[in-house]
Amino acid sequence: MTEIKHKPDWAPENAGAEFTTRIMAGVEGGHDGLPRETRLSTSRPAAPRRRRLSMDEYVQGVLAGDRNVLAQTITLVESNAPAHGAMAQEVLRQLLPHTGNSIRVGITGVPGVGKSTTIEALGMYLCEQGHQVAVLAVDPSSTVTRGSILGDKTRMEQLSRDPRAFIRPSPSSGTLGGVTRKSRETMLVCEAFGFDVILVETVGVGQSETTVRSMVDFFLLLMLAGAGDELQGIKKGIMELADALLINKADGDNKLRARAAKAEYNRAIHYLAPATEGWQTRAFTCSALTNEGIDEIWRVIEDFRQKTQASGVFDKRRRKQTLDWVYAMVEEHLLRSFFEHAGVKHIRADVEKAVIEGHMPPTVAAQELIGKYEGSSTR
Ligand code: GDP
């Protein structure tokens, strides 16, 4: 294979994929998180397409807490159509002063660990406590695996029916960068709307944990007792990102094992660098099925918020995350522009071949490609 190892997945061969992302139709398409079946009788003809809103209607609607407008605004933000881009950015600019008043919690763990069950249990608990909860997902593979939240409509059934909650599936597949941008912007729209708890689910596909870590205040790693770390795909690196480890399924026969795992992880974490300055990551147990431990983990999150806000770490992280986001977008733009550059495309196969066959040192190859991109190549 002559493939460059770090070639991003949107490099030329499949660059088109990014732009084929579906734009979900109006609010009837499940944007409020409700399974379509709960709202539309199958015999009813499809609703007519909604009229496009004006900028003011988007902004005022979101600020006034209009759910239909919320769904339409998110659709606008998620749209890849160039015509929507400028409008979306202006709407976001106007909503920006109303954002930030939430706690953003990322939740990760291998498939089957109980992420959606836990989010449902925590979400229901929070709604009962008077919170307004938005659940978002970051899953760059969602159209392939259909594994994202609500892909299977039995997931989070109770929460999806609760008017105090809002569930938004992952934007349909694209690059991790593209999906993340949309999720971040959706998060801001949700905050402007008034959600004070944002739960961001990530599927454990390598980089997505790091990406979600970069957009949340508190990062929760769900684990299972008894399964080896290798089995759980848990690398030390992921544990180092977590502000708490939550050993799920601590019920029935598994309870004792979960407690033992908690003690073991508490010992192990001690040797890791803290994910958040001034905060000691600890392990806890819970059962998303019986709700045991759900209130405790929320108290931990509240305690985290209070301590990090008092120390300034909370705001410092958010400021850094915002700047990192800017440069992540710059980086993505530059990379794409490089791989889509006609001159680069033209010589790339030959340069790669020469490197693989040992005729050209990698440094020279990089210079050739960059030279071509910058228009200074002699080839
Ligand atoms: P996800 O893939 O991480 O989102 O996992 P799910 O939430 O879909 O859960 C996977 C399976 O584990 C489902 O069959 C759940 O019913 C089950 N499950 C989730 N949480 C618990 C729990 O706390 N206890 C037990 N016994 N089963 C659970």
Image (cartoon, rainbow, N blue to C red):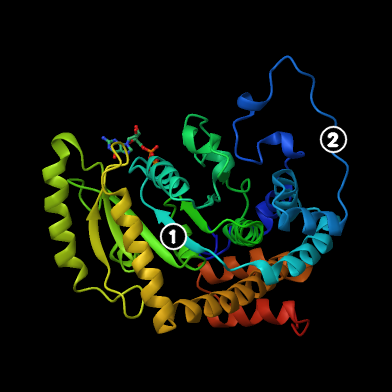
Of 124 and 149, the residue lying toward us: 124
Disc on res. 209: 1
Above or below 320: residue 16: above
Looking at the rendered structure, the kind of residue marked 1 is: Glu
Q: What's the residue at 31%, 36% (across, down)?
A: 289
Q: Is mark 1 within 8 Å of ligand 1?
A: no
Disc on res. 113: none
User: Which element is circle 1 on?
Assistant: helix
Q: Which residue is mark 2?
A: 49
In this picture, residue 191 sits left or right of residue 310: right
Question: How crowded is the residue under tag 1: few (<14 C-alpha within 10 Å), some, or many (20+)?
Answer: many
First in sequence: mark 1 vs mark 2 = 2
Above or below 297: residue 274: below
The picture places residue 8, in percent across and down from the top left corner, at 58, 62
Q: Are marks 1 and 2 in contact (CB under 8 Å)?
A: no
Q: What's the residue at 35%, 56% (across, down)?
A: 298
Q: Is residue 210 visible?
A: yes
As drawn, the residue found furthest toward the top would be 43
